[in-house]
Amino acid sequence: MQAAEQAQITIPKIGAVWPGQGGIYAGFIPARNGVEGYHLILGDELERAEWGQYGDESPATSLIDGRTNTLALIESGGEYPAAIAAHNHEADGHADFYLPAAAELYEIWLNLNGKFSGWVWSSSQRSADNAFSMYFDDGLQYDYDKFNELRVRPVRRFIR
């Protein structure tokens, strides 16, 4: 993207649809642990899905980097329905969606509190049997058995 094009980009208010970016603007995620800061866009809710591979350790261990977790799950060749659904999501010409990490879900809840409800999967594994999820009604993060079917809300990054 050219510098002139970047200068013309207007970042919407948190909670507003970001035209051309594939969803709702969920706020700025600050740099942490080697991951640069980025704007987070929340895509449409997808079909409920299992997290997958109950009883198996997965490579998705980051609590902050959902993109890395999702790519690790996809590249492992395993059966991870929630991550696959998020990874396959496309909107407004963007095909770089992923299943958010536990910390990304918490940031979404902080910024969009009250905008939607229910349990949503994160890409962060808790153990061989469980993965983290977020209850958007009250901000509770919990680990659910990977065979449960929860909501999938893909996200993507906009780095400016």
Image (spheres, rainbow, N blue to C red):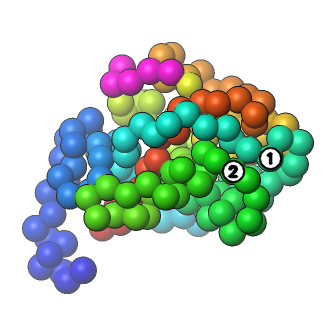
> At 83% across and 41% down in the image, what residue appears?
54
Residue wearing tag 1: 53
Q: Position of residue 154 (x, y in %)?
A: 46, 47
**What secondary structure is found at the residue carrying circle 2?**
loop
**What secondary structure is found at the residue carrying circle 1?**
loop
Q: Which mark is residue 29?
A: none
Regarding residue 27, the answer to whether it shows in the image is no
The relative height of residue 150 versus residue 2 in the rendered view (above or below) is: above
> At 52% across and 58% down in the image, what residue appears?
87
For label 1, the crowd category at 10 Å Cα-Cα, with few meaning under 14, some 14 to 19 and many 20 or more, is some
Which kind of residue does numbered mark 1 sit on?
Answer: Gln
Q: Are marks 1 and 2 in contact (CB under 8 Å)?
A: yes
Q: Nearer the viewer, residue 6 or 126?
A: 126
**Magenta stretch, residue numbers:** 113-118
Residue wearing tag 2: 80
Q: Position of residue 156 (x, y in %)?
A: 41, 56
Dividing the image into 4 quarters, which one contains the C terminus?
bottom left
